Image: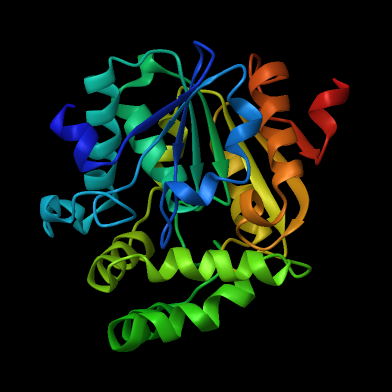
Amino acid sequence: MHPILIRNNVKILGEGSQVLLFAHGFGCAQNSWKYITDAFLGNYKVILFDYVGAGDSDLSQYNQKKYATLEGYACDIIDIIQVLDLKNIIFIGHSVSSMIGMIAALQLPDVFKKLVFIGPSPRYLNDGDYIGGFNTGDIETIFTHIAQDYVAWSKQLVPRVMDSLCKPELCDFLQECFEATEPSVALAFAMATFKADYRDQLKNLEVPSLTLQCTDDEITPKSVGEYIHKNTPDNFLVVMKATGHFPHISAPDETIREIKDFIENAGTKSASDHLYTSGDFAHQ
C-alpha cells in the first residue's frame, strides 16, 4: 500500500464509479460517517480517511508546522487524490473540513465535481457586521480548556453540539470519537480552525456547492450559512430540520436525503438566488 494511504488510513468502499470523498471534522475520524455511508455504497465509490493525528492515522507523520494551518490538512486531501488518481470527485466535508475541501478545490478545480458542506464556517470569530458565533475571549477560553483537560472539555461540549433530541448512545459515540483524538493534536487543530479566515476565498470557488445548515447550531449559527450562500458562486443553502452540529450522526436519514438530492438532482445551474428548506431538492 502507498505510504500516503497508510498515513491517512484510507479506506475505499462501494460498488459505483462516481467518487464520494468524505472528510471528517474536528475531534472525529472517519468512523463518524458510519451512520450514513451504507446508504451510498450501492451506487458510489466511497473514500474515507483520517487526518494525521486522528483515528488510525500514522501519528508519527504529524508535523506541527504543516498542520498549523488548514492548508496543511488540505495537502492531505490533495495527496490522497493524486495517489489514487481521482477525478470528478464529489467532496463531503463536515464542519472545518468544508473549508479544507474548498482549499483543495481551489488548488485542483478540475478534479472536483461538487462540494457538500455540513455545518461550514469560513470564519468562526465575530468581525464587525459578520457574526461568526464566537468572540476572542470565547476562543481563548476554548484553547485554555483543551490544553488543561481535553477530555473534560469535550464532555461539556458534546451534549451542547449534538441534536437536542439525540439518543444518549449517540452522544456516547461522539464522546468516544473526541477521546480517541490525541489532545495535543486537538489543540493545534482547534487553533488552526478558530484562527482561520477564508471569507475572501469563497468568491473564487468554481465548483457547485451545497451548504447544509442545521437549526440551533451552537458552532455555526444560521448567519454563517447565509453568508456562505450569498458570497459563494453556485452555492445552495438548505436549512435542515436537524439541530446541533453533527447531523450525520444525530439525523442520518435527513442528511442522506439532502446529500443525495443535491448530488443527483441539483447543482448543475446557478444557485446564487436559491435557498431551500429541508427536502426541497426532491420537488424540483
Note whether 266 is above or below 104 in the view shown. above
Q: Quadrant of the N terminus?
A: top left
Q: Where is residue 277, by image quadrant?
A: top right
Return the residue found at the far right. 283
Viewer-side residue, 144 vs 80: 80
Residue 258: image location, x then y, percent = 72, 35
Viewer-side residue, 192 vs 243: 243
Viewer-side residue, 77 vs 17: 17
User: According to the image, what is the colour scheme of the structure?
Assistant: rainbow
Q: Where is residue 249, by image quadrant?
A: bottom right
Q: How many marks?
A: 0
Q: At 85% from the left edge and 20% from the top edge, which residue is drawn? A: 284
Residue 103 seen by the camera? yes
Residue 202: image location, x then y, percent = 45, 38
Q: At 69% from the left edge and 36% from the top edge, which residue is drawn? A: 256
Return the residue found at the far bottom. 148
Residue 183: image location, x then y, percent = 28, 73
Residue 274: image location, x then y, percent = 74, 31
Note whether 264 is above or below 183 in the view shown. above
Left or right of residue 156, residue 49 in this image: left
Left or right of residue 104, residue 249 in this image: right
Q: Where is residue 264, by image quadrant?
A: top right
Residue 137 seen by the camera? no
Note whether 113 is above or below 154 in the view shown. above
Viewer-side residue, 135 vs 173: 173
Left or right of residue 125, residue 6 in this image: left
